[in-house]
Image: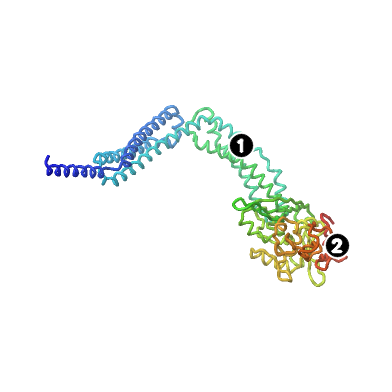
Amino acid sequence: MSRSGLKVLAIVLGLSIIAVLFAGLDNLPRSVRNQIDGERAALASAQQQVRSAKDGVDRDIQSEAALFAEVPAASQYPARFSRANGLLATASVEMAQVSELQRRNRRQDRPQVESLLSQERSLRQSAVAEAEGVHKDADHWVQLKQRLPQTLAEMERNHRAIHDYDLAALAPAVQKAESDWPDKKADLDGRLQAERDIIAESDRLWETTADARRQAETGKYAGVDLAALVVAAGQMETNAAALPRKTADLQSLTAQLYTAWDKVLVDMETRGRGSSKEYQQKIRTVKTQVADASSQGGATTSDERWVGVSPFTYDAMRNNLGMAVEHKSAGKYDDEAEKVAQPAGFAYMAPPGQSNRYGYWERRNGSDFWVFYGQYALLRDLLFNRNYRPLDSRDWSGYRSSQSRGQTYYGNEASGGQKYGTQSSSTQQSYSGSSYARSGGFKDSRYAAKPGGYRDSQYATPMSRNPGQGDSSPRSFGRNRPSAPSSGYRPSKPFSPPRSSPGRSFGRSFGRRR
């Protein structure tokens, strides 16, 4: 072949290759073709599902004709299956259009193909959901009938338990609580009436379903509203469970009215490092049980435990050591507890010039001081960590003002520092043995656990007083006391009440009752 002929042949072959390449690029993408095949198979499966659902419902209706004759929803079954078949027919039309576009195999038809597939998919899924919904409803009624003897037996047991429930034992406790705490009368009456209403409703359900229950027990369903019967049985079961629970709640609430309690933050510490760091608080819960609203005495108990808290809670309460972080007064429910931290014990004080079950105000040296009655010495010592310092009327006024604004009252020392909470000198002294103190929590205090922290105290080591000199061996706090205290620290003189107040005391003895 001549050179010119070879050139012509090369040009023809190149053009052919280019034509083949461009022809392939104009086809529908393989992913779209795969979607078409998948939806075509899914549509065929949906058609089979709808047929199977209808066959199953038809069998149920034939075998339980008397039952479905009384089921209102059964009259809608044919229309619902017709709707499902109509959706499938429309989906089939959409798929036929997709098949034609697939035959043409043009890339430019991709958006139209994907839109048609989306419409077909939605129609197919709706058709299946409609048919399966009918099938599920029919099976539900068949199962209800099969389980009906058991349902009716349970209904009878529940009614008997409710009808025989005795509220008489609860009424005296409620009446006493209402007498002691009149502001709770409406709530307590409402709760007790709710229990009586449960019993009355259960009796009504039992009476109104009597005929239906008799017919159902004999297998005669003509005129029986099976759904209403089953709903009544379910409500009876709910009532049977609710009645003892509501009774227990009411008993608990009436008991709560006779208990005052405080949660005092008595220690804090962190454990671990980095992401494994844990934040702990030690809470002392102090409870005082009273016999009635006018009782002048009460039994006080307490317990302490460490609880884990979030870093946010730990930081937010870091300044509240020794304070009542929650308080609930007698005559209140637990869920009415005050949750704004306040100095421990302040909630038990009466307004200046008045007294209450816990104590009274006494004037001494031109100032009014709060005195706890002797029978509440244990309560006082637990709240103040056995370091009670008489509270004056100015502190009470500051506390009440802060409390009305929803703020914590820390008070003010004459030196300008805080009088209560972590930063106060009395708290740092009272909780000097705490984990918080040992970990350096009182870093600016003489009670902090750090070298030289007690340099001005009689308990300081020679090494801490004069770094670099003397014996550096460790000593336990409060031991190895020298024969005479140094001038750097002197314990404060206890406040003494006048001798003319028999039975009333600032006494410091733990647990002493007067």
- Find the distance from the CA under tag 1 to the CA under tag 2: 80 Å
Mark 1 or mark 2, whichever is nearer to me: 2
Q: Amino acid at mark 2?
A: Pro
Q: Earlier in the sequence, mark 1 or mark 2?
A: 1
- In the rendered image, the residue lying farthest to the bottom is 366
Between 460 and 104, the one nearer to me in the picture:
460
Dot 1: within a 10 Å radius of its alpha carbon, few (fewer than 14), some, or many (20 or more) residues?
A: many
The vertical placement of 39 against 337, above or below, is above
Q: Position of residue 482 (x, y in %)?
A: 85, 62
Q: Label 2 neighbourhood size at 10 Å, few (<14), some (14-19), many (20+)?
A: few
Judged left or right of residue 423, residue 206 is left
Q: Amino acid at mark 1?
A: His
Name the residue tied to disc 1.
159
Q: Which mark is residue 151?
A: none
Give whichever of 433, 245 is nearer the camera: 433
Quadrant location of the C terminus?
bottom right
Q: Position of residue 509 (x, y in %)?
A: 83, 57
Q: Is residue 335 above or below residue 202?
A: below
Disc 2 target residue: 482
Q: Indicate the quadrant where residue 18 lies.
A: top left
Please tell me which residue is depicted at 76% across the width and 58% down the height of the picture.
385
State how many labels appear: 2
Q: Is residue 506 above or below residue 277?
A: below
Q: Nearer the viewer, residue 385 or 293?
A: 385
Q: Is residue 53 left or right of residue 293?
A: left
